Image (cartoon, rainbow, N blue to C red):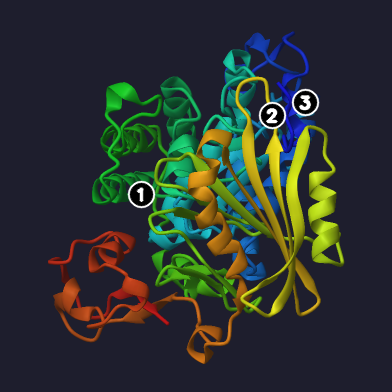
């Protein structure tokens, strides 16, 4: 089958180029076992994937917060199996990288070779340093246990490739599609299911172990899994334990305090919570999607920073990424991909560059205008494929010295029916001029000290910004709306 514009990341070749395996030591158990690739290969893979992750998610621009996460990660690393006296030098000398990603999804994951990530969405949902310690220790445990290399033995290129919690690439809708790092709940679920239950339970135990040995109150980690359970229940996305490769959050919620107590019985004092310091570090963190980076407003995708807008077909799901905006039809049978073309200087050059690829038959093309003002060029294209032909509308627009390009596609048999929606979206691209939208600011969590004892719900603003639900903020604070908050307690309130 011809792959016309599937963009598989470079590291897929690194992971799947060979079906051979190597027998090496597991730093956690100390035993030798089969892995998909050597430790040197894991480090190489992690380095390549890190570039892709950083580009797809974007890094959260807060040097002080990233330094805080890194310093805590290094403390835990010193107690891990990667730094112990009997640890082989190849593991002991491996540098770790800790990053904060600019994503509202509540997630943390690790890549082979020492790359650990937490999202700003996750940091917003934690309430003290001890909870963060358990999360970081858990991810260090995945690296130390070489879980990605173990899982890779059962992965095939024909599957959605999930390595160490990162989506390497995927085919959308059974059609040729661009590699997506989907930041929606669906992607979060894929990340959530990436390891086996055995690996997750081992990493839970290691996260508790490393935190307890570092002096943190490891039992606090249970509160985060309570939050995960509440988030899932609120979204109606509870995953039955028996159907998930990941342990149920409720199971982990009860097991973590038990494991923490076992370490306490071995003489490890676990006194550090550092709630005040943690809340100070995340004070002002962006909460939810950052509207300045684009959002859907009354059926129109608007981007205040880049000052453009275009309508989104009714009912379509929008996936907003740093490098592109993707819209998927309700039936998941059509896709619109929008991005800035930094390589072309004219709309025609942008369309020509795309349609020059092998396998594309141009049915019609020509000059036009978007919103009756901006110079544009389009091409109606058929992509011949052995399984099914694809109908494409490629549309590029020139505005304010930039070239913007839409790639609209579906199966050939549905193309004529869906094309009017493609045309309306592309040809309605326009400059954003609404002063209120141009000046919009992101929602930030502000740490505030309450001056009276009252129910949590009574401390929330009467009108929460960006249609935020009060229950969301209760979950963020790890309380219920009816919980009584004592005077002098710090809480997190969304402000815009």
Residue 396 image position (x, y, % from top left): 73, 62
> If you read the primary sequence from the N terminus, does the residue marked by circle 3 or circle 2 appear first?
3
Please tell me in which quadrant of the rendered image residue 17 appears.
Answer: top right
**Can you name the residue that lies furthest to the bottom here?**
435
Label 1 belongs to which residue?
Answer: 224
Foreground disc of the pair 1, 2: 1
The residue nearer to you, when weighing 352 against 56, is 352
The residue nearer to you, when weighing 285 against 160, is 160
Residue 111 image position (x, y, % from top left): 64, 36
Mark 1 closeness class: few <14, some 14–19, many ≥20 residues within 10 Å: many
In the image: residue 324, left or right of residue 344: left
- Image point 65% across, 62% down: which residue? 67
The residue nearer to you, when weighing 188 against 121, is 188
Label 2 belongs to which residue?
Answer: 85
Q: Secondary structure at mark 3?
A: helix
Mark 3 closeness class: few <14, some 14–19, many ≥20 residues within 10 Å: few
Q: Secondary structure at mark 1?
A: helix
Residue 149 position (above or below residue 493): above
Residue 250 image position (x, y, % from top left): 26, 37
- Image point 55% across, 46% down: which residue? 335
Q: Tell me, yes or no, whether the two marked residues, 3 and 2, touch with CB atoms within 8 Å.
A: no
Foreground disc of the pair 3, 1: 3
Mark 2 closeness class: few <14, some 14–19, many ≥20 residues within 10 Å: few
């Amino acid at each position: 089958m011809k792959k016309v514009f599937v963009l598989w990341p470079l590291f897929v070749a690194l992971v799947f180029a060979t079906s051979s395996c190597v027998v090496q030591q597991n730093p956690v158990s100390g035993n030798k076992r089969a892995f998909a690739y050597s430790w040197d290969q894991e480090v190489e893979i992690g380095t390549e994937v890190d570039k892709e992750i950083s580009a797809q998610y974007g890094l959260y621009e807060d040097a002080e917060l990233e330094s805080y996460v890194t310093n805590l990660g290094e403390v835990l690393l010193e107690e891990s199996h990667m730094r112990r006296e009997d640890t082989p030098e190849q593991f002991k000398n491996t540098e770790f990288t800790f990053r904060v990603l600019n994503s509202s999804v509540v997630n943390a994951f690790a890549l082979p070779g020492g790359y650990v990530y937490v999202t700003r969405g996750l940091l917003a949902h934690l309430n003290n340093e001890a909870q963060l310690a358990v999360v970081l220790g858990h991810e260090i445990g995945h690296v130390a246990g070489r879980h990605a290399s173990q899982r890779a033995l059962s992965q095939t290129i024909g599957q959605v490739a999930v390595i160490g919690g990162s989506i390497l690439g995927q085919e959308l809708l059974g059609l040729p599609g661009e590699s997506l790092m989907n930041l929606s709940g669906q992607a979060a679920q894929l990340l959530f299911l990436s390891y086996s239950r055995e690996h997750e339970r081992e990493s839970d135990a290691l996260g508790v172990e490393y935190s307890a040995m570092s002096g943190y109150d490891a039992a606090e980690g249970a509160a985060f899994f309570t939050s995960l359970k509440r988030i899932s229940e609120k979204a109606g996305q509870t995953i039955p334990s028996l159907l998930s490769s990941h342990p149920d959050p409720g199971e982990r919620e009860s097991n973590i305090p038990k494991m923490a107590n076992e370490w306490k019985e071995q003489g490890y004092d676990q006194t550090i919570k550092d709630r005040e310091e943690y809340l100070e570090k995340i004070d002002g963190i962006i909460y939810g999607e950052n509207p300045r980076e684009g959002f859907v407003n009354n059926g129109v995708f608007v981007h205040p920073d880049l000052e453009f807008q275009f309508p989104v077909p009714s009912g379509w799901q929008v996936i907003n990424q740093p490098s592109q905006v993707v819209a998927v039809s309700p039936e998941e049978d059509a896709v619109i991909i929008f991005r800035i073309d930094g390589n072309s200087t004219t709309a025609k050059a942008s369309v020509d560059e795309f349609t020059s690829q092998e396998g594309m038959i141009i049915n019609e093309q020509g000059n036009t205008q978007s919103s009756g003002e901006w110079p544009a060029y389009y091409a109606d294209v058929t992509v011949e494929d052995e399984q099914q032909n694809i109908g494409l509308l490629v549309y590029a627009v020139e505005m304010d010295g930039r070239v913007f390009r839409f790639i609209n596609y579906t199966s050939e048999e549905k193309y004529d029916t869906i094309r009017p929606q493609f045309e309306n979206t592309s040809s309605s691209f326009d400059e954003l001029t609404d002063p209120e939208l141009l000046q919009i600011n992101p929602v930030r969590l502000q740490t505030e000290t309450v001056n009276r004892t009252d129910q949590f719900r009574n401390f929330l603003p009467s009108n929460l910004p960006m249609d935020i639900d009060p229950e969301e903020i209760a979950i963020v604070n790890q309380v219920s709306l009816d919980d009584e908050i004592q005077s002098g307690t710090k809480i997190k309130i969304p402000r815009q």
